Image (tube, rainbow, N blue to C red):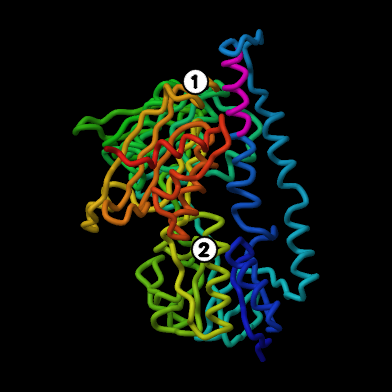
Amino acid sequence: MARTYDVIVLGTGNAGMAAARVTRQAGLRVAIVEAREEVGGTCALRGCVPKKVLVAAAETFDAVSDAARHGIVAGAPRVDWPALIDRERSFVEGTSEAFAETLRRRGIELVHGRAKFRGRNEVEVAGERLSAGKVVIATGSLPRPLPFDGAEYLIDNEDILRERELPKSVVFVGGGVIALEFSHVYARAGCEVTILENAPRILGSADTDAAARIGERTEALGIRVRTGIEVKSVAREGGGFSVHFGNNGERQSLYAERVAHGAGRIPAVEALMLDAGGIEHDGPKIALTEHLASTSNADVYVAGDAHAGAAQLSPLATYEGEVVARNILDGNTTVPDYRPVPSVLFAVPPLASVGLNEAEAEAQGLDVAIDQTDMSEWFAARLYGSESAYAKVLTEKRSRRIVGAHLVGKRAEEMIHLFAFAMKFGVSADQMAKLVYAFPTSSSEVKSLVARRE
């Protein structure tokens, strides 16, 4: 006989923890299933939190390197890679145990094992049947499968965050977010880095001009970026690997000690046996209603990276988990609003975005003013010796409503929240320009970015 709950949540990442928390607070009996031994999901254990420790080191490396600009005499910096990895791991230690204790304290039952659907409202975990009125799929994502021989040799973000020996050379297959973020750290540590991207440009989903600025800084670091590349195979060679690829019809190859996956991630749902749960899907993409419920099984919801139609962002996963919980409790009354959700590429410098990019605004037929600004000679950039500072703001012409913003440069990851706030609560560009900002600050430059252009 199956153990029965009101809600079963699959996954203990941001989305799963949020859905479990809200439904449990409402008095429902909740079980949460985790396939791994560790509790807490990608962001806290294998993603954004430990990764940002490496990014902070890269930022500090640049600050020391640029000390002479500020009249400070300092020696040439050097990254102690094993010490950096040890520091990064210290941010992860104890996290899983803390999450497990939080679940226990809240009265949420933790079940370890891989879940498989055995019916529309039933899953099997470690040979035991669990049933519930509602099931939430929040199983996160995994690296996108790559269709060439030797793909199994590629390391991923989890491997990078654990490897205490700095490789002399790395080839990233794919020029997505993970590739850019880690390549900026690797390069500053003295590693020779190459990015091989199949598409005509890196960061294909980002605004074209903002991505180009990041591309320029990436190449300025000595990172080789090659686009229009089709990787054919990866093979062991000596103490490393040879990467064979096609370029304009020619077969070429590169050697590196490590080959890393930078081609994006997909929902980790294949092992769930979705068909047994009556869940319509196209491969890893589950068909959903606007309330994040399965179109074919109304008792199943999806949140976080398992949702193929939304950006893979940890705060967004938490938000979707809360949306799903509210719909379980209130009967599908909440539709997620993705417009004002900011995202950040934590390269050095960062690229921060919110809303539509220029191509998306054009595709929607919006009548927008597009203001691009090279801010490299503005006060904040000169103050900190930043070599790249750029902004693009998209404003609807009639209403002066902000529909998108894309910032490159120091503190862009903080400034973007002003634009997100404006979009969320209907603050116009003119109203943003009227705010009195503390000066001198990076945020005070927003006033000029949104001012009317006569």
Residue at the image point whose x is 26% and y is 50% from the top:
368
Identify the mark at residue 382; answer none if there is no mark: 1
In the image, residue 210 above or below residue 131: above
Q: Position of residue 301 (x, y in %)?
A: 50, 76
Apparent side of residue 199 relative to residue 4 in the rendered image (left or right): left
Q: Earlier in the sequence, mark 1 or mark 2?
A: 2
Amino acid of disc 1: Arg
In the image, residue 163 above or below residue 424: above
Q: Position of residue 50 (x, y in %)?
A: 64, 43
Quadrant the N terminus occupies? bottom right
Q: Position of residue 443 (x, y in %)?
A: 52, 38
Residue at the image point whose x is 62% and y is 81% from the top:
7
Residue at the image point whose x is 68% and y is 81% from the top:
26
- Tell me how far mark 1 sits from mark 2, CA to CA: 39 Å
Camera-side residue of 129 and 34? 34
Residue at the image point whose x is 61% and y is 61% from the top:
13
In the image, residue 35 above or below residue 299: above
Instruction: Name the residue carrying label 2.
Output: 304
User: Which residues fall within the magenta stretch?
Assistant: 56-67
Graded by Cα atoms within 10 Å as few (under 14), some (14 to 19) or many (20 or more), the crowding at tag 1 reads some
Amino acid of disc 2: Gly
